[in-house]
Image (spheres, helix red, strand yellow):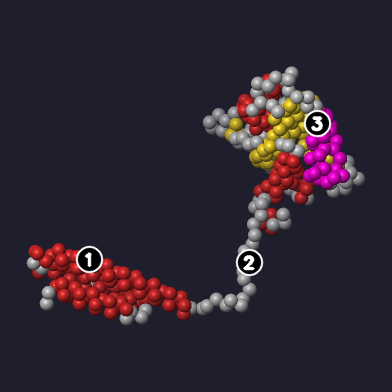
Amino acid sequence: MSLLVEIEKLLEEGKGAIKNAASAETLENVRVAYLGRSGKIKEMMGRIREVANEEKKAFGQGMNDLKKSLEKLFDEQKNILGSSKAKSGPQPDPTLPGQSQPRGSRHPLTQVTEHVVKVFERLGFTIADGPEMEDEFHNFVALNIPDEHPAREDQDTFGLDNGTILRSQTSTVQIRTMEKIQPPVRVIAPGRVYRPDAVDATHFYSFGQIEGLAVDTDITFADLKSVLGMFAREMFGSDTKTRFRPSFFPFTEPSAEVDVTCIFCHGKGCRVCKQQGWIEILGCGMVDPNVFKSVGYDPEAWTGFAFGMGVERVAMLTLGVDDIRRFTENDLRFLRQF
């Protein structure tokens, strides 16, 4: 019998064996018997020495086709047996109630940040952003913070190996914005800042901050009070009042701390506001002329105001949270409340 005929016979034999395999175990035995290292195909290939030279090419092609055909049939039968096994198992009950997946939500600090930003966007401010790794010029020098200021001491700033620092306020974004564009300017800069504070219920080494800047001709402190008054009413309620107390910041002159009527007792006095009826919410002031000079603005032609607030502080007040650390613990029982 010609070996080419034997190849055809082996193909038909293999097809039958694969088709008749009723289980995965039987099918695997068929595969080993025909396609294994010591299987019938391997044995047939060893008989190539019996083939005349002019028929060796046809023999090789025939063996190659035989192997591919059986491998394809094996894969098909394997899939059939696999799907049959799956169908024979327990079937889902369409009458059972579905299993709903819990819905995620934005972090409460993100929600507060977005709320604050939207209020200022309605007042004509646009969002500005900047790097969290900063140099001393943008973080200190351009903001009129002198060398002897405590904020510039090593223990009060996170220094990095490459000589840069982690920004300690988003005022750096104001400087970079003024370096890029000429007045008028009206931007709001949300972002993360870093200070090596001891962690407790009201302090953390990384927190969110939102700072604003407006520069134009003839801007006065009255404009600042008007803008922050509108923000307070939009953020905390239409009956919210503001109070400005003199303060000091190196980058503004004059400077002020801003209080709002307590959102819990509405100014009557309670435990949260320490019976004062007021809660401090942010700092602000008119931009110091030295800051304008550092970015190439003419302080005789332009005036402006700036302000800044901590996102966590606003969130703690509006959401009734008593410990800043709760925002970073990733406790879903806490986060799902918002």
Q: Mark on residue 223? A: 3
Q: Amino acid at mark 1?
A: Asn
Q: Residues within 10 Å of mark 1 (few under 14, many from 20)?
A: few
Q: Mark on residue 100? A: 2
Quadrant where the image shows the C terminus = bottom right
Q: Amino acid at mark 2?
A: Ser
In the picture as drawn, the residue positioned furthest to the right comes out as 268
Vertical comparison of 179 with 82: above or below:
above
SS assignment at label 1: helix
Q: Could you tell whether 152 is left or right of 30 in the image?
A: right
The quadrant in which residue 240 appears is: top right
Task: Residue 52 in the image: state x and y as whole percent.
Answer: 8, 67
Task: Residue 228 in the image: state x and y as whole percent.
Answer: 80, 36
Q: Toward the viewer: 22 or 141?
A: 22
Residue named by callout 1: 64
The quadrant in which residue 38 appears is: bottom left
Q: Residue at x 83, y 40 (%)?
A: 260
